[in-house]
Amino acid sequence: MDVGWILARPVVALGILVFIWGTSWPIYKVAVPYTPPLVFSGMRALIGGLFLVAIIYKSRFNIRWKENWYKYCISALFNVVLFFGIQTIGLLYLPGGLFATIVYFQPILLSILAWLWLGELLTPLRMFGLIVGFCGIVIVSMDGLVVHLSAIGVVLGLLTAFSWAYGVFYMKKVSQEIDTYWLVALQFVIGGMFLLGTGTVVESWSDIVWNGQLLFGLIFGGTIGIPVAYLLYYGLIQAGEASKVGSFTFLVPLISVSIGIVILGEPLTITLFVGLLLVGMSIYFVNYRGRNGGSAACNSEKGKPSV
């Protein structure tokens, strides 16, 4: 995958990604009441995958299905089937904001996996920054944690985070062996078909209410929320360090909450303010390069500490 422009403008790419994901939660929240959840997840994943396939169709010779089919399927299993599937079930046990908070334990898991198996640099300060960021997300949803605590919901949230972390780690691991554009596209086509088929069996299409909210959610997910966002995300993971990208994704739940304040008239609470402060500190710690900023950054890209 060509990530040259992402390397040249990582902050812009991160900003676009965080904004897309931050707006996705309220958009999907408005749409999902009008459709069975598995069918909805399958439709948006399949539409997003097919949309990307249409864009990159001319490079179809890069698929090499016979030698790479199992890689597409493994990626689809963790990044789509388990991630979307467990997420959908977990939302039955916990409020969306609280469940998202648990899911965003993923950057810490991803950083640990990248450190253990890929040799990426993970300094104590960087790990501390990730923990601070996660604490900021927890504080934002403190009321929900106290009122809605559910053991099943928490376990499902952690499983969602782990499936996402391992899925991204797997993609990063095989990125030199397979065309990343096609890996992203086909994982959503395969995973979307599986979710849609499962939803067809256990849910009812007659429960769908076709209206503007649902159509907007599907169009957004199929054109921006999945293809654009995930290409940016995996491009950033491939081009830089997982922990750096992870620190910025802590902003996603806060953006979702902020949209609720601005658009839905929800109050600005002290917990939100403290959470924003901690996330800001997290981003600073994770990206801190010290006095030898240039050389440290260069060495960290190679997964080696600066000397």
Image (tube, rainbow, N blue to C red):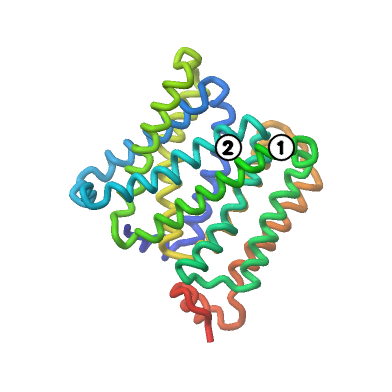
> Which numbered disc flags the more N-terminal residue, 2 or 1?
2
Left or right for 165, reference 48: right
Left or right for 151, reference 198: right
Work out how far the residue at label 2 is from the one at label 1, CA to CA, in angstroms: 21 Å
Measured as percent of width and height from the top left, residue 295 is found at 50, 81
Q: Quadrant of residue 168?
A: bottom left
Count up the numbered dots.
2
Q: Considering the image in quadrants, where does the N terminus appear?
A: bottom left
Kindly identify which numbered label has been placed on residue 150: 1
Q: Furthest-bottom residue in view?
A: 307
Kindly identify which numbered label has been placed on residue 56: none
Q: In front here: 291 or 158?
A: 158
- Asked if labels 1 and 2 touch by Cβ distance under 8 angstroms, the answer is no
Q: Quadrant of residue 92?
A: top right
Q: Furthest-left residue in view?
A: 61
Q: Quadrant of residue 2?
A: bottom left
Q: Which residue is rendered at x = 39% and y = 26% of the image?
A: 197
Q: Which residue is rendered at x = 73% and y = 46% of the image?
A: 140
Q: Residues within 10 Å of mark 1 (few under 14, many from 20)?
A: some
Q: Secondary structure at mark 1?
A: loop
Q: Secondary structure at mark 2?
A: helix
Q: In front here: 234 or 196?
A: 196
Q: Furthest-top residue in view?
A: 206
Give the answer, above or below, for where 173 lies relative to 207.
Answer: below
Give the foreground label among 2 and 1: 1
Measured as percent of width and height from the top left, residue 209 is found at 50, 15
- Judging by the rendered image, the residue that carries numbered circle 2 is 25
Q: Amino acid at mark 2?
A: Trp
Q: Residues within 10 Å of mark 2 (few under 14, many from 20)?
A: many
Give the answer, above or below, for where 15 lies relative to 295.
Answer: above
Left or right for 19, reference 102: left
